């Protein structure tokens, strides 16, 4: 039996919303770990909950190391006219 399509809209019931957040967060972390193992990829994932709690995953090394590698990699691609540092773009946010 196939599952129905999930409507992509905010879940109004706070209990259901929290349960869905926990399940989907766990699924996202699992997929990121699988991708890292199967494809030998370095993955950094940052999730902030609606209550401001931080969840992060760095598959190789530390999150700080991945952020530094990202900044080092992207600084070489900036136009020279821009003197301000580039803002860090996070991979994923869930609320």
Image (spheres, rainbow, N blue to C red):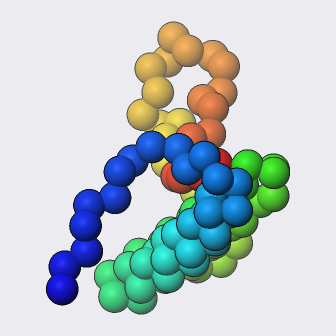
Q: Is residue 29 visible?
A: no
**Is 35 drawn above or below residue 83 in the view shown?**
below
Residue in the image at 62% along x and 58% along y:
17
Please state which of residues 95 and 28 is positioned toward the viewer in this rendering. 95
Q: Position of residue 49 (x, y in %)?
A: 72, 55
Relative placement, left or right, of 1 versus 34 is left
Please state which of residues 82 and 87 is positioned toward the viewer in this rendering. 87
**Residue 9 found in image quarter:** top left
Please state which of residues 56 and 39 is positioned toward the viewer in this rendering. 56
**Residue 79 found in image quarter:** top left
Total marks shown come to 0
**Residue 83 found in image quarter:** top right
Relative placement, left or right, of 4 versus 31 is left
Residue in the image at 25% along x and 67% along y:
4
**Is 87 drawn above or below residue 25 in the view shown?**
above
Residue in the image at 53% along x and 36% along y:
75
Residue in the image at 34% along x and 58% along y:
6
Q: Is residue 32 visible?
A: yes
Q: Position of residue 46 (x, y in %)?
A: 64, 58
Which residue ends up furthest to the top in the rendered image? 81
Please state which of residues 1 and 70 is positioned toward the viewer in this rendering. 1
Relative placement, left or right, of 48 versus 9 is right
**Is 49 drawn above or below residue 33 in the view shown?**
above
Q: Can you say which quadrant of the picture contains the N terminus?
A: bottom left
Q: Position of residue 63 (x, y in %)?
A: 69, 65
């Amino acid at each position: 039996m196939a599952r129905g399509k999930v409507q992509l809209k905010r879940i109004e019931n706070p209990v259901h919303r929290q349960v869905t957040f926990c399940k989907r967060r766990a699924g996202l972390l699992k997929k990121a770990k699988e991708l890292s193992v199967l494809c030998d990829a370095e993955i950094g994932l940052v999730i902030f909950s609606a209550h401001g709690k931080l969840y992060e995953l760095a598959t190789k090394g530390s999150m700080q190391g991945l952020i530094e590698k990202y900044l080092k990699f992207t600084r070489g691609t900036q136009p020279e006219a821009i003197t301000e540092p580039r803002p860090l773009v996070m991979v994923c946010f869930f609320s």
